Amino acid sequence: MQDASRSLTRRNFLKVGAAGAAGLAAAGAMTGCDAWLGAAPQQAAEEKTVYTLHQFMCTGRCSLKCTVRDGRLAMIQPNDTVDPYYRHVCMKGISEIQHVYSDERLQTPMRRVGKRGDNEFEAISWDEAIKTVGDELRKAWGKYGKQSVYMSASNEPRFGFLPALLGCATGVEPGIDRGTGNGSAPAIGGDVFGGGTCESRDWVNTKTLIVAGANLLESSMMQSNTFLDAKKAGCDIIVLDPHFSTTASKASQWIPIQPGTDAAFYLGMTSYILDNKLYDEAYMREHTSFPFLLDEATGKLLRTGAPWGTDEETGEPVDPGDFLVWDGAADAAVPYAEAVATAALEGTYEVNGAKVITVLESLKRNQKPFTCEWAEGVTGVPTETIQEVARKYATAGPAFLAFGQGGSDKYSNPDIIGHAGMVLTALTGNIGKPGCGIGHTIGGAGYSVALGEWKLPEQFKPAELDVRADRFPNDNGGVHVIISLGNTFQQYWANMNKTREWIDSLDFIVHIGMYYEDTVRYADIVLPVCSKFEDTVEHSIVRSDYNHVNLQTKCIDPLFDSKPDFDVMRLIAEEMGVGDYLPKTAEELVRYQIEHSEDLAEQGITLDALVKNHGSIKMAGTDEPRRAYTDQVFETPTTRIEPYYEAWTACDQAWPTWEENNEAYAGNPLADKYPLQFTQTRTRFSNHSHFKAAKWLQQFAKPTLELNPVDMEARGIADGDLVEAFNDRGSFKCTARANNAIRPGSSRTWEAGWSKYIEEGNTQNVTNDHVNPRDAFLPTGAPIPFNDTLIEVKKA
Ligand SMILES: Nc1nc2c(c(=O)[nH]1)N[C@H]1C(S)=C(S)[C@@H](COP(=O)(O)OP(=O)(O)OC[C@H]3O[C@@H](n4cnc5c(=O)[nH]c(N)nc54)[C@H](O)[C@@H]3O)O[C@H]1N2
Ligand SMILES: Nc1nc2c(c(=O)[nH]1)N[C@H]1C(S)=C(S)[C@@H](COP(=O)(O)OP(=O)(O)OC[C@H]3O[C@@H](n4cnc5c(=O)[nH]c(N)nc54)[C@H](O)[C@@H]3O)O[C@H]1N2
Ligand code: SF4
Ligand SMILES: [Mo]
């Protein structure tokens, strides 16, 4: 193998034609890839067992037991030394024994020889490739400045130090996975959408679990046991989903909902709870801003201090002081600290000549139009069902609102969902108590500890850009060079045809990746990295999450002419003259992270201990599920839940207020042309676009467009037909699949398919890149509304 890979470092001309896979297959033959794909030897001269850490984007971060025979990965099993509750592997993990040796692997550094996008490359040496990258970076720095370089990174690659070292910006994430969180964060001052207010193990204490816009039995497979344990313990699991998902099929109740209308469902629930006084008054007085007074005319909260604004003489901002509440006994407005237990929750009063109302009163007024009957009209869910869920949520005991990141999060205005969820939480006190909570629990949301942080000198800081990465195609944001890690050109931008035009306008693109995925074709220089099984050192990753500390360990040497992430990052840093600020090796970094972690020291966890414990240690103190806010102290200025967003009066969302989607809504005239909503979901067969090259898996996961038989019949489409899906942005062609689980009027595909495995085009060609004008108010900016997309489908 070594000899074969070395043969590729010769400057042999490797042309990867339009049929990219075929081109690389030829390269594969050169490196003996076919031999690698032969059956593993039953008798090996040398066999060893290695325990190592796998992927984290799937939220599994499984510790695996790998059998290596004669330097070849031969078998993958779960780490059998791990606590059985956390002992797991999925078929993606098992299939790595083929995936790692796939003929889709990028094998050698390459340089583009044809036009950008034409997919023609020649093999070059690492020296030449890195020198070219350096020359291009220096050229861009001289011409436009350092901020003209952008590192566009998928979640798995580990190049964390590079943006600071190069002074370039990174972080395309803002538009992704925080749509709902945008609306909930202001209420408690914390990001519950990085992983709920408590762990999913706590669901055994939950009476009513609402799983909405999540298919966690596929997207958080390794926490399936927490879901099933809860069900066994009697938890009523209600799944809100337009489609009959895997998770819906295992729940107590499936509530089919019109896509993109979850906010209306919660607004209906809120009205029912208000009308029937199912809220917890004592909780609201003590732990929320519901008793605060606000000026009816302006929507401003009343404070003890001077009016808001700046002091006329000093120009300094005025400290507005404490919030005012109405004290019934005193018949006067007083600072809330003086009337915590007695403050009026309702009513209209007069203070200094101004008409004032309580925050709760204000909510009631805002809710007037949002009756359960109205919600039925929008969501298609019967009034009685909304009422029943509201009654259970408010009165049946601990309740949990588990929002997803892949479904309802990916429309134009999911912040209204997050905000409405927080209103429900504040009304009922379903937070900080066993079995209660809100937020994303994809991944289990257990305990983790801080690792030691390798600090770069002060002068090294990533650049900050005024424009978000997914907006580059509108206005290139001053960016002319992209360092691309993973498949972000496909994954992080909707409306791919527009993305392509922008890509054409860039000066230079270096792509650093493992597989021949869509982004590669746009690169000027390609640098091949290796999988987490291959390494040049023993250990290059340590991670702490889901109640464990896990260590990655080398199984095999780097395949072909690929290099580990750390080594590539270091080569680029050295070329730019800043390599010395990095640890010498990834192993030195791992040691540093472990040895400089106070938390790990406290737990007595060392690198030696991790190695001795087969790469995985369950942390002490994690037997009870993690719960946040058990003291009911929140991260807001008042330490209470503040469901009223005073600052959002300017965008008419001080209270969650219904707003149609941008595209996928009933009555949109565009629906005459493109009547089908287009849902993209994750699948257990891949981590987004990763594992699309795992052939053993993909034979069962061919890209399809799933449609309800009713919609197929209306279009004369039969199961297995080749169809074209299209709208004004673009189109793609793939096989149609009949599925009764799909909501009529909607369609579904597994996101992240590579163009080469789709008959024509890419699903991203049709997705919506609309920006909600509320962008500036949202803590992480407007989400990319991938699912807020309308299409039409016809036989191709
Ligand atoms: N195997 C695997 N696991 C993964 C990933 C992966 O790629 N593969 N990716 C990880 C990442 S990055 C993420 S963000 C998470 C996402 O994990 P999830 O949030 O669970 O996302 P999906 O699996 O796409 O499931 C979304 C569900 O929402 C439904 N849905 C669509 N529109 C609506 C709507 O308007 N309302 C409601 N209520 N439901 C709707 C869809 O039908 C689908 O069943 O998964 C993580 N886990
Ligand atoms: N249309 C549509 N688009 C979407 C979504 C959707 O629902 N619909 N979902 C969005 C969401 S939620 C997310 S989070 C993003 C995800 O988008 P990405 O973060 O880009 O996810 P992946 O496609 O999994 O990309 C992971 C990349 O890392 C590579 N990789 C894996 N392991 C390693 C490693 O150890 N080292 C290195 N260097 N590389 C590695 C893989 O080969 C792959 O190229 O996609 C978003 N895009
Ligand atoms: S891909 Fe599968 S085996 Fe690997 S970490 Fe994720 S869930 Fe675990
Ligand atoms: Mo995500």
Image (spheres, grey):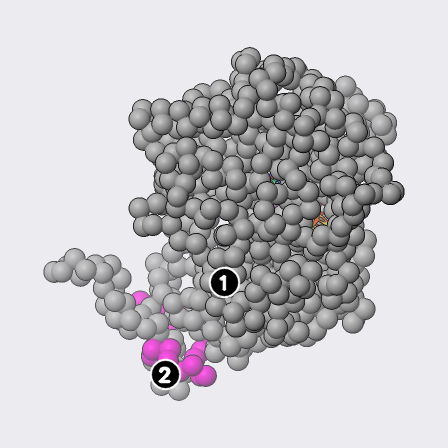
Q: Residue 735 appears at what percent x and percent y?
A: 79, 27
Q: Which residues are magenta?
A: 333-357
Q: Which residue is mark 1?
A: 595
Q: Is residue 412 left or right of residue 237?
A: left
* 113 shown above or below 668: above
Q: Residue at x 36, y 65 (%)?
A: 301
- Give SS at disc 1: helix
* 609 shown above or below 793: below
Which quadrant of the view contains residue 706?
A: top right
Q: Is residue 136 left or right of residue 539?
A: left
Amino acid under label 2?
Glu
Q: Which residue is mark 2?
A: 338
Q: Inspect the magenta stretch and tell me whether residue 342 lies in it.
A: yes
Q: Are marks 2 and 1 in contact (CB under 8 Å)?
A: no
Q: Residue 204 appears at what percent x and percent y?
A: 73, 71
* 676 shown above or below 329: above
Q: Residue at x 27, y 67 (%)?
A: 320
Neighbourhood count class around disc 2 (C-alpha, 10 Å): few under 14, some 14–19, many 20 upward:
few
